Image (cartoon, rainbow, N blue to C red):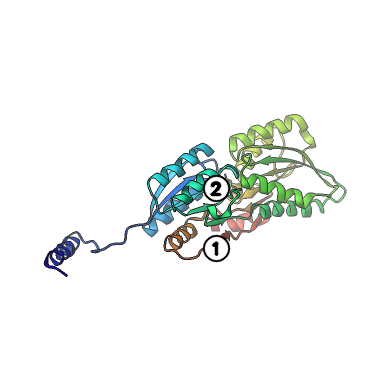
Amino acid sequence: MNCNRRTFLAAAFAAAFTLNLPAFAAKPLVIGFSQVGAESEWRTANTVSIKDAAKKEGITLKFADAQQKQESQVKAIRSFIAQRVDVIAFSPVVESGWDTVLREAKRANIPVILTDRAVNVSDPSLYVSFLGSDFVEEGRRAGRWLVERQKKTPDAVLNIVELQGTVGSAPALDRKKGFEEVIAGNSKLKMLRSQTGDFTRAKGKEVMEAFLKAEGKKINVLYAHNDDMAIGAIQAIEEAGLKPGKDILVISIDGVKGAFEAMIAGKLNVTVECNPLLGPQLMQIARDVAAGKPVPKRVVTQESVFPAEVAAKEFPNRKY
Ligand code: AHR
């Protein structure tokens, strides 16, 4: 080592010591994350989990809220590429239309992790890992609950209305598919109407009002693709002079605190869990990817089903 380099290193150590910093602190990992929006209680919990986990891990998180717009997500991903982040993660608002921008990320050598929702791409190497729930199974769980419930009134035909999530999104497509798979061929379960409520309370209420106007007391069951739409619809049912949870059975998905409160109040019959607390696992996958370690292509979140009967007991354990 020549004299100049020794002098430089000594000065660097002295400066680091004075500033109370490690002399050669590793550069923090930088993740660009594009979130769907803030459409539901679930989404808010998901955002908090991701931000908290990044902070705890000392990871720099560049966070962009797409307000449920695919164009905004594409724009955010392009901006992350331009900023040369280490890893891009995103929860795609809809399934299709990602090939071009993901190819751009691949060309720039930036690994992409999907969280929560899947994409439909021609080349699966466009993303390195997908962390999230099995939405088809969630739909099946909702359907199985209803099949069992119908057996309590074996002669009755139950008329169902369905509030779908955002059009073209993985949870809307898959939850519909899983539910239909289970009720198919069951002559006692009949789907009357099915429409999107965009995963929001306001839209859930509005569409349920329209269902009630069109079908009135014929409706026996509401299947909502998330708790927020169910909570909005419960309001519509009450305003129509009916009792949610009794006159109309209410089935939904997520397991947020609001759903537990509705179950405890006797207004919602069952919620199928969809866990939003993906932050810690996402940070781990991002670290492994950045370190060049192999990561699983698919990580499925473990979840459960909560009928109203267990709501009061489970409520204190709920984290979101
Ligand atoms: O993608 C997960 C779904 O998106 C949640 O079920 C819903 O509440 C959210 O908006």
Q: Nearer the viewer, residue 83 or 260?
A: 83
**Residue 224 seen in render:** yes
Q: Amino acid at mark 1?
A: Pro
Q: Is mark 2 within 8 Å of ligand 1?
A: yes
Disc tally is 2
**Residue 44 seen in render:** no
Q: Which residue is mark 2?
A: 42
Residue at mark 1 to residue at mark 2: CA–CA distance: 25 Å
**Residue shown at 43%/50% (left/top)?**
108
**Residue shown at 21%/61% (left/top)?**
20
Left-right relation of 155 to 120: right
Earlier in the chain: of badge 1 and badge 2, it is 2
Using the rendered view, name the quadrant where residue 59 is placed. Answer: bottom left
Using the rendered view, name the quadrant where residue 164 is placed. Answer: top right
Residue positioned most to the right: 155
Q: Nearer the viewer, residue 313 or 51?
A: 51
Q: Are marks 1 and 2 in contact (CB under 8 Å)?
A: no
Estimate the x, y position of residue 46 in percent, counting from the top left. 50, 50
**Residue shown at 74%/51% (left/top)?**
143
Q: Which residue is mark 1?
A: 296
Estimate the x, y position of residue 287 in percent, counting from the top left. 43, 61
The residue carrying pointer 1 sits among few (fewer than 14), some (14 to 19) or many (20 or more) residues within 10 Å by Cα, namely: few
Left-right relation of 129 to 204: left
